[in-house]
Image (spheres, rainbow, N blue to C red):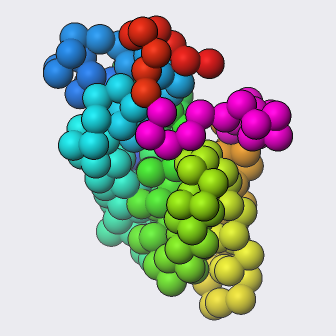
Amino acid sequence: MALEILVIVVSYLLGSVSFSVLLAKLLKGIDIRQYGSGNAGATNTLRVLGKGPAILVLVLDVLKGIAAVWLGTWLFGWGTWAAALCGIAAIVGHNWPVYFHFRGGKGIATTIGVMATFAFWPALSAGIIAILAIVITRYVSLGSLIFVALTPLFLLLTDYTPPILWTSIVIAIFAYWRHRTNIVKIAGGRENKIGSKVKGGNRVV
């Protein structure tokens, strides 16, 4: 039990490494949470820093989720509750990072890493539909919400362990909570679309 708790804590600390914040500080000497949408994630990195840094942040955030799941799997076995909790802990760390005053991102890239590791084909199927939604609407937030909503539904059609299914459900709840303001903006047609730029160096709301 002590080892499980330790590994979950390590996964949280791993997830707490906010590459968006670190890269913005390194490249421009700014706190990215004060610019663009105010979110410490790949989409806002694209808006504030450009494509190259955004791709790097996306890849690194995905890798956090993959690493957390494999850490739990290596120690406790595939599809176990401990491995599932390691994945969730990494997402919690990304959303509420201890190193950055608990102000992080919305966890979608890390979620992709976690769910693609646990359930590649359901995650891929949900991801394809989510990408199509982003291409059509240019709302990354909408695609993110579609991804987390469809993943557990596709899992129900396959043969995965209860911990993996419940992980996908918990992650979906996290995502909808973190995107609650985006949902309101989408409904009102005020959501920032992909490719929108920072206005005057100030935070865009």
Seen in the image, is 42 located left or right of residue 89?
Answer: left
Horizontal and vertical percent position of residue 179 = 68, 38
Q: Is residue 184 above or below residue 168?
A: above
Residue at the left extreme, as displayed:
27
Residue depicted at x 53% and y 24%: 37
Image quarter of residue 137: bottom right
Observer-nearest of 33 and 60 = 33
Residue depicted at x 22% and y 11%: 29
Residue 168 is one of the magenta-drawn residues: no
Horizontal and vertical percent position of residue 95 = 53, 34
Horizontal and vertical percent position of residue 154 = 68, 80
Observer-nearest of 193 and 91 = 193
Residue depicted at x 28% and y 35%: 50
* Magenta segment boundaries in residue numbering: 179-196
Whether residue 120 is visible, yes or no, is: yes
Image quarter of residue 160: bottom right
Image quarter of residue 72: bottom left
Residue depicted at x 37% and y 54%: 62
Residue 189 is one of the magenta-drawn residues: yes
For the C terminus, which image quadrant? top right
